[in-house]
Amino acid sequence: MDRLHRITLLIGKNSVSKLQQATVMVVGCGAVGSFAIEALARSGIGHMVLVDSDNVEESNINRQLFAMDSTLGKSKVDVARQRIYDINPNSIVDTVNMFVDENNMPNVKPDFVIDAIDTVQSKIALYKWCSDNAIPFISSMGAARKTDVAQIKISNISKTSVCPLASKIRYLIRDLQLPNFPVVYSTETAAIQNNGGREFGSIITVTGIFGLMMADFVIKKLIQ
């Protein structure tokens, strides 16, 4: 029995073959993105493109799969690539050490894109690039300051509520006349911070589910 035996029993050989032939790009390899990458790799995605400009920091350890004592200071995309090869040595992994904005986009055309980045303007630039190149994508809204996993949902951005980031994104894409698209978001009201700092608290149970739900969405779309 090979490493994809159990998923083959579930979805069939033809569907597994579609996953093996697919190219998925994940932009952002942190708290949300790392779990999306893990799920895609373990589901047999044949070609992955990983985009991130950050290195692993100690403060990442509470919520990011690639953050461990042994990886501190290393490039997130390099750590992610090595982990994917440990999971599936037959996969193809391209890494792009890049901060995505309107002037910086990877020179690829994947079958699907997962947006797991935090910066609003980078998200908007990625949406526009995907739209211009007819590439389907799903985007993560705000997972910080949330604790109730039961309130995590997937919907089109036009149908979101409560999430302040989603509200801001709705306004911006309306002005740019960008088309509707799916997002993962939470209807939970954000918790009050325990301090007045600019960094937001987050927990792996929420950020991880955001990433897993996006990977699940992509897998189902690829095998339709």
Image (cartoon, helix red, strand yellow):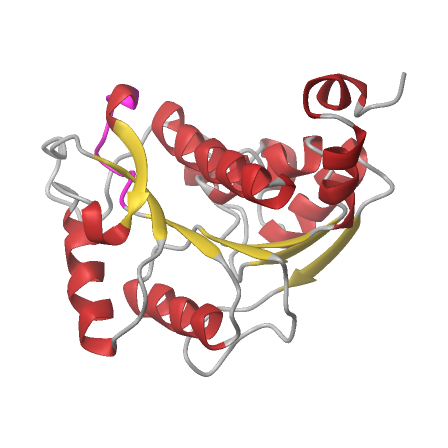
Work out which quarter of the rendered image holds the C terminus and state it.
top right
Task: Give 189 or 4, whichever is nearer the viewer.
Answer: 4
Picture coordinates of residue 96 (x, y %)? Answer: 63, 65
- Outermost residue to the bottom: 103
Picture coordinates of residue 134 (x, y %)? Answer: 51, 70
Work out which quarter of the rendered image holds the N terminus and state it.
top right
Task: Give 17 or 70, whichever is nearer the viewer.
Answer: 17
With respect to residue 188, does 224 lie above or below? below
Picture coordinates of residue 201 (x, y %)? Answer: 26, 35
Position of residue 155 in the picture relative to residue 12 (left or right): left
Position of residue 158 in the picture relative to residue 44 (left or right): left
Task: Give 190 or 9, whichever is nearer the viewer.
Answer: 9
> How many labels, in total?
0
Q: In terms of secondary structure, what is the magenta stretch mainly?
A: loop
**In the picture, residue 172 is in which quadrant?**
bottom left
**In the picture, residue 126 is in which quadrant?**
bottom left
Q: Residue at x 75, y 17 (%)?
A: 9
Q: Residue at x 56, y 37 (%)?
A: 220
**In the picture, residue 200 is in which quadrant?**
top left
Task: Give 5 or 84, whichever is nearer the viewer.
Answer: 5
Q: Is residue 195 visible?
A: yes
* Stretch of the chain drawn in magenta: 142-149
